Amino acid sequence: MKRFFLLGLFIIAILITAIFIVARKNPNKPLPVVETAPITGPKKFGDIAQGIVFTYVGPSVSLPVSLPTYTMSYPSDLPDRTAALAKQWGFTAALSRPVPYVYDWIDNDKHLSYNDQSKNVSFSLFSSGLQSQPLALTTQDVFSSLLSSRFLSDDFSFIETNRQTILPEGEGGDKSRPPLTVIAYQSKIKDHAFPFFFSSVTRTAGEMRINPSGQVVSFSFYATAKIKPEQERQVLDLNQIIRELNSGKGYLTGLSDNASGYTPDASLSFAEVKISSITPAFLFVPEESRFVPIYVIEGDGYGQKVQRVRYFLRASS
């Protein structure tokens, strides 16, 4: 019996290896695209581990007295508008729908997708498309098309928050590909100082990747809706924020063992948090179909080691 078991494992290993080799040889392998995370708000505002002590050690902070919530209204025909983009950008493939809420157009050299559940629209050129360059989009072309198609609302402005270069060896080891510049964008309401987060796990509203020629090889954006402010409500002051955190309110959204950025694999190992910054912001909560005011709280957690931490705390009831 043991011999048959080992033989079965050997056969499975051979099959997995063969599949991997075939996938590596696929000339139309899409370029890596960092998808913005699905729109997910907090399921509850009470995920802080009990017993953690919070204190504020940052500079004097000026917080608003009141903030509104914002209701959202998306166009009902975004799938049709995606189809119009596919036609505008020369897609010849027919629409495919792998699941009811996903709309895909996949040519030999490019891919356009819209997710009607997360309201995310994404585009990428395949490797073969990079060589022939059938579609030369600039960042301005992308913004213009998404604005005219009403994927991006003119209620929002989009601000570049990060730009970095990714070398070929960081993109699957294919050194024949040129380095890519990754540009991250944050959305804000025009004439409004505070950022709007579409997800509790990402601080970006969208991303583009461009090659050395300035051609966009991929992008991924949340559709931004028309928004309407509701009546302002009083928000927490500094003392109330500390009291709420110490009573277990809020939830952890970022944790890191170093200062280079938050990492998903870090494990919590602290019992005290010294807060260095508190920033008002708005977070989309799907269960309420609106943006609610929150505080983005960042600092250092002290315990077995020092860890960088970020919490979200609802700013009003």
Image: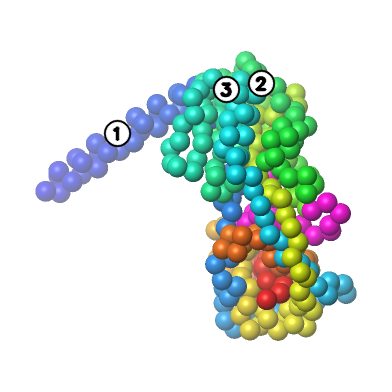
**Boundaries of the magenta span:** 189-208
Residue at 46% over, 24% down: 26
Left or right of 215? Residue 3 is left
Q: Quadrant of residue 289?
A: bottom right
Residue 65 in sight from this viewpoint? yes
Mark 1–mark 2 Cα distance, whole angstroms, equals 40 Å
Depth order, front residue of 182/149: 149
Task: Locate residue 301: give its quadrant.
Answer: bottom right
Tell me the kind of residue under disc 3. Answer: Phe
The percent position of residue 124, horizontal first and vertical second, equals: 60, 31
Q: Residue furthest left?
A: 1
Residue under label 1: 14
SS for dot 3: loop
Question: Residue 103 in the image: x percent, y percent?
Answer: 51, 36
Q: Which residue is pictured at 67% across the width and 68% down the height?
A: 312
Outermost residue, top direction? Answer: 132
Residue topped by disc 3: 91
Q: Which residue is mark 2?
A: 135
User: Do the CB atoms of the residues marked 1 and 2 lie less than 8 Å apart?
Assistant: no
Mark 1 is on which residue type? Ile
Coordinates of residue 254 in the picture (x, y in percent): 64, 62
Exactly how many numbered labels are in the figure?
Answer: 3
* Residue 198 among magenta residues: yes
Q: Residue at x 83, y 51 (%)?
A: 190
Badge 1: few (under 14), some or many (20 or more) residues near its Cα, within 10 Å?
few
Q: Is residue 97 left or right of residue 116?
A: left
